[in-house]
Amino acid sequence: MFLHISDSMTVEDVQDRFRECFPSLDLVFYRTPNKKWQGLDKSEEVSPRERIAYIRDNHYNGVLEIKSWHAVAKVEEALNELFGLNAQIVRKGVGDKWITNTLNSNSTLADQARLYEAVA
């Protein structure tokens, strides 16, 4: 997939596009960076209605190519390095729960999707 990022978009625009390609995964954006091996504080989560321009200092508009075999951590790092976005990829759990991938950041997007399918 090609994920377009621009200041005029909302967080929800980016999330919708990501979920089109990875329906059992989602991107959650935060005001502060993620610390390795830790989930982020819900109070730092950015509203889906927030404009991308207001949650980053780096205003580079561009495209990130994301493949299912890319590691979750690498996608999160690329979003931060290229676009100045603090994002965490989460997967669907049972019911309405979303599960963060804090223990195995080398797992791929496909691995995370398969974990959802195993419990669905």
Image (cartoon, rainbow, N blue to C red):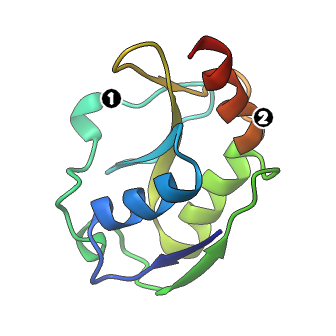
Residue bearing the label numbered 2: 107
Local secondary structure at mark 2: loop
Which of the 4 image quadrants contains residue 105?
A: top right
The residue nearer to you, when weighing 19 against 44, is 19
In screen coordinates, is 10 left or right of 18? left
The residue nearer to you, when weighing 68 against 31, is 68
- Amino acid residing under circle 1: Asp
- Amino acid residing under circle 2: Ser
In screen coordinates, is 37 left or right of 100? right
Q: What label does residue 41 carry, if any? A: 1
Local secondary structure at mark 1: loop
Q: Could you say where residue 71 lies in the image, as x and y percent from the top left?
A: 77, 46
Q: Could you say where residue 21 lies in the image, as x and y percent from the top left?
A: 58, 57
Quarter containing the N terminus: bottom right
Name the front one of labels 1 and 2: 2
Residue at 28% x, 42% y is 45
Crowding at label 1, few (<14), some or many (≥20) Cα neighbours within 10 Å? few
- Real-space Cα distance between discs 1 and 2? 22 Å
Residue at 23% x, 54% y is 48
Q: Could you say where residue 60 lies in the image, as x and y percent from the top left?
A: 48, 86
Mark 1 or mark 2: which comes first in sequence? 1
Residue at 31% x, 61% y is 11
Which of the 4 image quadrants contains residue 6?
A: bottom left
User: CB atoms at circles 1 and 2 under 8 Å apart?
Assistant: no
